[in-house]
Amino acid sequence: MSATAVSLPIPRVPVRREPLVDRPVDGSKKVLLAAPRGYCAGVDRAVVTVEKALERYGSPVYVRKQIVHNIHVVRELEDQGAIFVDEVDEVPEGAHVVFSAHGVSPAVVDAAADRGLQAIDATCPLVTKVHREAKRFARDDYQILLVGHSGHEEVEGTAGEAPGNVTIVNNPDEADTIEVDDPSKLVWLSQTTLSVDETMETVDRLRARFPDLQNPPSDDICYATQNRQVAIKKVAAEADLVIVVGSANSSNSVRLVEVALQHGAKAAYRIDYADEVRQEWLDGVSTVGITSGASVPDVLVQELMRELAQAGYRDVEEVRTAEEDLMFSLPKELRTGAHHRGGRGVAA
């Protein structure tokens, strides 16, 4: 894995076979633990939605796509009886199906209804907000420049709300070549899990070509994505190495690696599990920065810290840049008597 460039998908690094060794380095060994990190309110809501659906309706409950982009969470829910499918036509007629936190297009909703499925929508409310914006601007006959990654489930869902009006802009370079029908009726929206800096570079380049480009009514990049990027920027400036816990298909986790490299970290890697840390990553490293993507349970970060402590990194300093107390209600089908596990994020 390169320590200077990261792009989707990131291959899983070989699993380490030997325990980490406490090798001496110049200076004391230290961990800078970014905060906020890990689960956001939308992820917590989605995971609890599947758990409560299993409790209420029994196994199996089907889930279209990964409920959130984290392999550990998916495996845990599979162990509880969830069955993950790519499309709703794989779900038996009449069964319960949960739509993932990333959202779905109206075509998927209609396909589920046609099969008589009992659908439970776990779409993050912040993604739903972008869907509403897309529908509103399409009704007013605007061309929507959707800043995001083609093929990502969230982008597919948002584009599906206004398929005749949405043009996807994948990166700043595409902003220089995109064609529009009417430069006076343009608005930009974005995928919620992008790099804030790269998104604004894309928008600035679009606006240089199309001065009348309108902004969304409110910020589309979610609060959790922004908070985690702000925290890792501060950590990266002081870290020799940054380790991001998160899965390869998690856009916000991958962005954290990129942001760390852009803001001072000498090296940065993404892992799913602590046993993926390589001994050579730690050679000569005094300060390790740690964070995790918004779909990552904190137990995985704690496992990483235990591994690093074994290698001598026992001095831990939390670097907190924001407090988070946002809560989302569960889908209406599951609200009665429901509560969440993690102490935050979901209201019954």
Image (tube, helix red, strand yellow):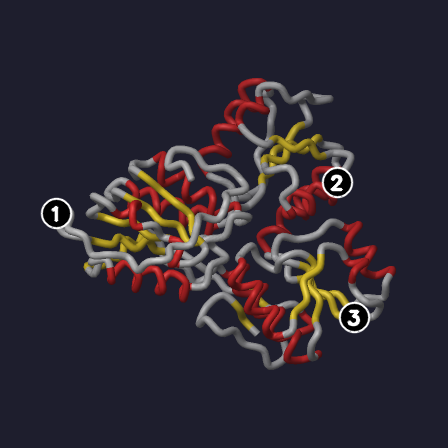
Distance between the Cα atoms at labels 3 and 2?
28 Å
**Residue 219 visible at all:** no
N-term-proximal mark, 1 vs 2 = 1
Element under disc 3? loop
Quarter of the picture holding the N terminus: top left
64 lies left or right of 212? right
What label does residue 27 carry, if any? 1
- Dividing the picture into quadrants, the one containing residue 92 is bottom right
Instruction: Give amino acid for label 1.
Output: Gly
Q: Which dot, 3 or 2, sits closer to the camera?
A: 3
Instruction: Give amino acid for label 2.
Output: Ala
Instruction: Give amino acid for label 3.
Output: Ala
Rendered residue at 69%/79% (across/down): 58
Does residue 119 sit above or below 125 in this rendering?
Answer: below
Residue neighbourhood size for the residue with mark 1, other residues' Cα within 10 Å, grouped as few (<14), some (14–19), many (≥20) = few
Element under disc 1? loop
List the residue tagged with mark 3.
95
Instruction: Give coordinates of residue 339: x percent, y percent.
Output: 54, 76
Q: Are marks 3 and 1 in contact (CB under 8 Å)?
A: no
